């Protein structure tokens, strides 16, 4: 089928950038992104391109080029479903916070609501594409809902997981390593649906990089990819602790092992821990799936990746307390960075949140500066933990407009995000304004140790032994 009209349900970090790039690369296809969140849609439609709901390098330019041409943002979900031949579901699939599987399983209520809405509205045959990350075999649940509550309409379900990383979303979408499309391999209709999605992507991606599989392989590949990536970070973080004890340097170890072509050099940066909306959620989901099949050893194996990550965050804050003479009560600590990684305004599961919470429990006073994260987001992240009352969070933690304000008069600076701009700061000026001895805890290994020590800082770098 030659697709002329696409709808995407969910205008978030995936739906927004993914559909903007499809609209850019396929000017003949009308792409409508819908969401129930009116404020989010209004922000996507705003003429202030600095205030789009998702910050990604290069995204505002693409939205400028395509919005009103063949890219549209709307809250009219029914209309967009009705008009589209192909519907992407790109809604959130968070970890369940209630009932069976609480704290582990993916909450599929938003997915099911979408399926029911599509079933109710559709009057013609549609292709429904899973863009959200889903437990393996979800497509059969979606199909069952669509087939049993629809109006005699034929639905084809595809799985097309998204592999973009935040901060590099536009580049990842324009030049992906691969695109994965899973479909029904047993029927001609299923294969035709797969081909119509292949044709959209081959407008700009070489055919050899568009991989087609059965539905279950596609769904499971997404969870597997995230589990492997997170496992690499936990593995190098585990080595960072050994490095600190032994005098090795984790960056030298990463380089040495990364030159082995079987290992590869990417994703070996030791850090204060991985964050982001995906890794933890998807591994917990994988652990839950393994357990539900009685595969306890498999479940334990992957759970260890999360346990290591929690340990890395806790040991970072423990080290701050220990180094500052075993008490941070009433001491000022500056946080540079709150986002879960550089070049994004996203803070979901950011290690900064846990580190801050631990230090606030020790009665530290924290001042935060992040180049892209807004003040209310930071307070909302802390409030979500429910560790203390909201007013206390606001008393103990302040959000500053620039780095020099944040670092003024503090006992220590902690680096939580690897923003490039941090390297360019006037560190002598920061040092001059701090309490002495002046400490830096570099959780991302971004600063130059020799330079910092020459200025006079007592400098701790994650994974660097003395
Ligand atoms: P998000 O929370 O940023 O966006 C989801 C949007 O869906 C929200 O705006 C919400 O209002 C909307 N929504 C929920 N239910 C709806 C409904 N019934 N009708 C209309 N709109 C509805 O989430 P995200 O980060 O874009 O993630 C979406 C999915 O993609 C998740 O499954 C996630 O695991 C997966 N994923 C995310 C990333 C990433 O980097 N963030 C990467 C790959 C895959
Ligand atoms: C991840 C996957 O990379 C992407 O393919 C998937 O679609 C969504 O989940 P994302 O979470 O956006 O993407 O960012 P990613 O670059 O993977 O970083 C995740 C976390 O790991 C960040 O907190 C990052 O700082 C950390 N990380 C990453 C490290 O600590 N060290 C590394 O070497 C790499």
Image: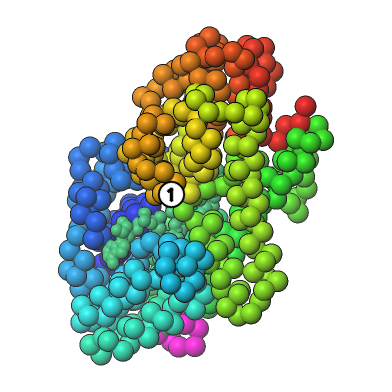
Q: Residue lying furthest right in this view?
A: 246
Estimate the x, y position of residue 76 in percent, counting from the top left: 17, 63
Left or right placement of residue 75 versus residue 127 in this view:
left
The magenta stretch is 180-189
Q: For the N terminus, give its image quadrant.
A: bottom left
> Can you say whether 460 is above or below 405 in the image?
below
Q: Is residue 65 visible?
A: no
Residue positioned 43% across, 41% down in the render = 344
Estimate the x, y position of residue 352 in percent, counting from the top left: 50, 39
> Can you say whether 304 is above or below 339 in the image?
below
Residue positioned 50% across, 30% down in the render = 364
> How many other residues sit within 10 Å of disc 1, few (<14), some (14-19) or many (≥20)?
few
Residue positioned 44% across, 22% down in the render = 406
Locate ligand 1 by image quadrant: bottom left
Decide which of 227, 246 is in the foreground and name it.
246
What colouring does the structure picture have? Answer: rainbow
Among the 4 quarters of the image, the one containing residue 94: bottom left
Decide which of 156, 284 is in the foreground and name it.
284
Local SS, label 1:
helix
Estimate the x, y position of residue 63 in percent, counting from the top left: 29, 46
Left or right placement of residue 250 versus residue 157 in this view:
right
Give the residue pinned by disc 1: 385
Left or right placement of residue 248 versus residue 409 in this view:
right
> Can you say whether 50 is above or below 306 in the image?
above
Q: Can residue 147 be seen in this view?
A: yes
151 within the magenta span: no
Q: For the C terminus, give its image quadrant.
A: top right
Among the 4 quarters of the image, the one containing residue 80: bottom left
């Amino acid at each position: 089928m030659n697709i002329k009209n696409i709808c995407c349900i969910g205008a978030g970090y995936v739906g927004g950038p993914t559909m903007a790039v499809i609209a850019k690369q396929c000017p003949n296809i009308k792409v409508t992104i819908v969401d129930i969140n009116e404020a989010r849609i209004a922000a996507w439609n705003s003429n202030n391109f600095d205030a789009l709901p998702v910050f990604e390098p290069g995204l505002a330019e693409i939205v400028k080029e395509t919005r009103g041409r063949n890219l549209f943002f709307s809250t009219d979900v029914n209309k967009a479903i009705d008009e589209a031949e192909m519907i992407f579901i790109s809604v959130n699939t968070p970890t369940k916070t209630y009932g069976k599987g609480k704290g582990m399983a993916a909450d599929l209520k938003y997915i099911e609501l979408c399926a029911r809405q599509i079933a109710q509205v559709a009057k013609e045959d549609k292709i429904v594409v899973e863009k959200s990350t889903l437990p393996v075999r979800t497509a059969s649940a979606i199909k069952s809902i669509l087939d049993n509550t629809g109006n005699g309409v034929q639905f084809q379900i595809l799985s097309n997981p998204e592999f973009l990383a935040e901060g590099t979303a536009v580049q990842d979408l324009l030049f992906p390593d691969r695109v994965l499309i899973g479909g029904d391999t047993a029927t001609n209709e299923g294969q035709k649906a797969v081909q119509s999605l292949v044709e959209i992507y081959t407008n700009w991606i070489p055919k050899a990089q568009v991989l087609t599989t059965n539905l279950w392989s596609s769904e499971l590949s997404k969870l597997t990819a995230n589990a492997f990536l997170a496992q690499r970070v936990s593995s190098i973080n585990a080595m960072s602790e050994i490095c600190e004890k032994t005098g090795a340097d984790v960056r030298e170890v990463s380089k040495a092992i990364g030159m082995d072509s079987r290992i590869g050099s990417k994703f070996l940066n030791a850090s204060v821990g991985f964050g982001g909306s995906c890794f933890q959620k998807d591994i917990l989901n994988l652990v839950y799936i393994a357990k539900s099949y009685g595969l306890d050893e498999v479940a334990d194996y992957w759970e260890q990746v999360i346990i290591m990550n929690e340990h890395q965050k806790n040991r970072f804050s423990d080290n701050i307390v220990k180094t500052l003479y075993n008490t941070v009560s009433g001491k000022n600590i500056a946080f540079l960075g709150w986002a879960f990684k550089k070049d994004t305004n996203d803070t979901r599961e950011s290690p900064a949140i846990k580190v801050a919470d631990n230090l606030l429990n020790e009665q530290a006073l924290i001042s935060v500066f992040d180049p892209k994260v807004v003040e209310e987001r930071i307070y909302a992240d802390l409030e979500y933990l429910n560790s203390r009352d909201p007013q206390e969070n606001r008393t103990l933690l302040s959000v500053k407009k620039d780095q020099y304000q944040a670092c003024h008069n503090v006992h220590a600076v902690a680096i939580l995000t690897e923003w490039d701009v941090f390297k360019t700061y006037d560190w002598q000026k920061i040092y001059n304004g701090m309490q002495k001895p002046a400490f830096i805890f570099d959780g991302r290994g971004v600063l130059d140790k020799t330079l910092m020590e020459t200025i006079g800082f007592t400098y701790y770098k994650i994974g660097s032994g003395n």
